[in-house]
């Protein structure tokens, strides 16, 4: 596992798991943060991204169009791979399902019946402990950014650059209408803004979160994983949104 980053390809190298690739080899470099069993037709509202979703097939649709839509939902939510039971309740899988996996570079894995899903989850949990320590350290340093505001009198762009360096994300801010929220900070593509503040935070390649303010959100923060960086996760992005809200209050006053 290079640079403390677990990938789908790393999981294939674990002999005890006996995983095999059915489609989507182009995505084997995707990072993995967790492995979770789900038999929901749409588990995406409860996901954060970079999960391996394991299923015995209970919720996998039987039609070609349904199977393709199921896979595309997972991929759009940032899932790293789909791990299917070799037997049990899996319906026949259509060519459209595998074609979608190849087009998107979305790994579809097969788990032998002799390997329980908990064994996969345990291997992933053990492998991501170092990443968890990194995320905690980043959270503590983002808390420290409140001190920078007072002690160093950083302007807004300099503050955001520091937060980006700590978090591993490129950060954008805007009002609910897509206009600049803070001076000197770029706005995101309006197409990624959610229709509701209650929408799931995960978007392809990162997160979108409301920036809190009295009476309702002042706008949105969009954070994309920076290439070559080690992203620190949703909790850190939430803290950055809080710092952005404090900065906005200071600028307005």
Image (cartoon, rainbow, N blue to C red):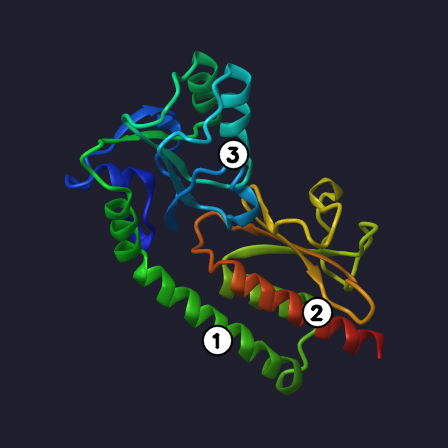
Residue 150 drawn above or below residue 36: below
Q: Which of marks 3 and 1 is nearer the N terminus?
A: 3
Query: Residue placed at 39% from the left, 32% from the top?
Result: 27
Q: Is residue 36 left or right of residue 46?
A: left
Q: Where is residue 125 in the image (x, y as percent from the top left)?
A: 30, 55
Mark drawn on residue 156: 2
On-image quarter of the C terminus: bottom right
What is the distance, in whole Å, between disc 1 and disc 2 at their CAs?
20 Å
Res. 213 image quadrant = bottom right
Mark drawn on residue 140: 1
Query: Residue placed at 74% from the left, 61% from the top?
Result: 184
Mark drawn on residue 246: none
Element type at marker 1? helix
Q: Which of marks 2 and 3 is nearer the N terminus?
A: 3
Q: Position of residue 178 (x, y in %)?
A: 80, 50
Q: Which residue lies furthest to the bottom in this view?
A: 151
What is the distance, in whole Å, between disc 2 and disc 3 at their CAs?
43 Å
Marks 3, 1: nearer the viewer: 3
Q: Where is residue 148 in the image (x, y as percent from the top left)?
A: 60, 80
Mark 1 residue crowding within 10 angstroms, few (<14) / some (14–19) / many (20+): few
Element type at marker 3? loop
Element type at marker 2? helix
Q: Residue under label 3, please give it.
A: 41
Q: Residue furthest top?
A: 95
Marks 1, 2: nearer the viewer: 1
């Amino acid at each position: 596992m290079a640079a403390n980053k677990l990938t789908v390809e790393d999981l294939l190298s674990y002999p005890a798991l006996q995983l095999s690739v059915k489609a989507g080899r182009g995505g084997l470099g995707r990072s993995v943060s967790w492995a979770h069993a789900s038999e929901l037709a749409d588990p995406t509202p409860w996901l954060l991204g970079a999960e391996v979703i394991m299923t015995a097939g209970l919720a996998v649709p039987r039609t070609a169009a349904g199977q393709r839509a199921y896979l595309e939902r997972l991929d759009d939510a940032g899932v790293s791979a789909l791990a299917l039971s070799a037997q049990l309740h899996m319906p026949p899988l259509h060519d459209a399902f595998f074609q979608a996996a190849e087009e998107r570079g979305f790994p579809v894995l097969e788990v032998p019946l002799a390997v329980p899903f908990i064994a996969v989850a345990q291997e992933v949990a053990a492998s991501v402990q170092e990443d968890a320590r990194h995320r905690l350290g980043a959270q503590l340093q983002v808390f420290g950014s409140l001190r920078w505001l007072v002690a160093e009198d950083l302007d807004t762009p300099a503050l955001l650059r520091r937060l980006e360096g700590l978090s591993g994300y490129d950060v954008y801010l805007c009002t609910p209408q897509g206009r600049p929220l803070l001076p000197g900070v770029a706005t995101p593509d309006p197409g990624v803004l959610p229709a509701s503040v209650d929408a799931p935070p995960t978007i392809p390649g990162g997160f979108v979160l409301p920036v809190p303010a009295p009476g309702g959100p002042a706008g949105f923060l969009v954070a994309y994983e920076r290439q070559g960086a080690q992203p620190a996760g949703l909790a850190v992005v939430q803290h950055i949104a809080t710092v952005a809200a404090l900065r906005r209050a200071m600028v307005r006053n």
